[in-house]
Amino acid sequence: MGKMYRKLALRGGEGGREWDDDVYEGVKKVYVGQDLSRITYIQFEYVKEDGEVVTREYGTITQDPREFIIEYPDEHITAVEGSYNKVALIATEVITSLVSKTSKVRTSPTFGPNLFGVVNGTKFKFEDEGKKIVGFHGRSDNAIDALGVYLVLDSLTTPFPLYKLDAQGGTEGRVWDDGSFDGVRAVLERQQHDLLQM
């Protein structure tokens, strides 16, 4: 039986190169490194369905990364929150703080530069009613420019996984969702023209 996943859109800046880890059974460990102004490094240890551990890392190690371990067999990450901001000598925004929360009501340290727990920048949060985070995607070069997550949704009767992507674009208008089908037969597009009165 397949699963359905929701891919939440990136939050952060547009610098660096795009990467996408796709989905796994779960996240086992997260390592985060930082300098005085931003998150510079992140490493994920994922667990596959057969128990194999897969490691993915991004950015540049500038200090010894700190780790957050998923300690219990039935524990998983349910929320990731943080902030992004412009920092000195960088034209685009970068991730400046990260915090993970789990199904066992545990919270990671606040990764990134912060004074007495205060972080600067635009805040974001990835969460959907306790659903399990099973993968990450983002942008990075010598720092972590942007971050997004994959959430696992309810199981389906399909033999293959399905992905639901967050809508891109503006926030005006009404929200609609056609659900999922076996395929798309045709796409019709109409364009509205303004007539110039002479």
Image (cartoon, rainbow, N blue to C red):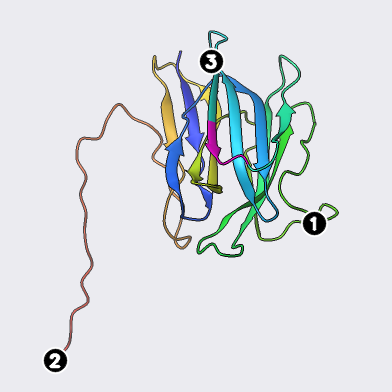
| Secondary structure at numbered mark 3 | loop
Residue 15 position (above or below residue 27):
below
| Residues shaded magenta | 57-61
Question: Which residue was labeled with disc 1?
Answer: 118
Q: Amino acid at mark 3?
A: Lys
Lower sequence index among marks 2 and 3? 3
Tell me, yes or no, whether the highlighted magenta stretch contains residue 74.
Answer: no
The span from disc 2 to disc 1 (Cα, nearest Å) is 60 Å
Q: Report the side of 157 relative to 95 (left or right).
A: left
Q: Assign the magenta stretch its main secondary structure.
A: strand
Q: Position of residue 182 (x, y in %)?
A: 30, 26
**Crowdedness near tag 1: few (<14), some (14–19) or many (≥20) residues, C-alpha within 10 Å:** few
Which labelled disc corresponds to residue 161? none
> Circles 1 and 3: CB distance less than 8 Å?
no
Q: Nearer the viewer, residue 188 or 133?
A: 133
Which labelled disc corresponds to residue 48? 3
**Crowdedness near tag 2: few (<14), some (14–19) or many (≥20) residues, C-alpha within 10 Å:** few
Q: Which residue sits at x=62%, y=28%?
A: 132
Question: Which residue was labeled with disc 2?
Answer: 198
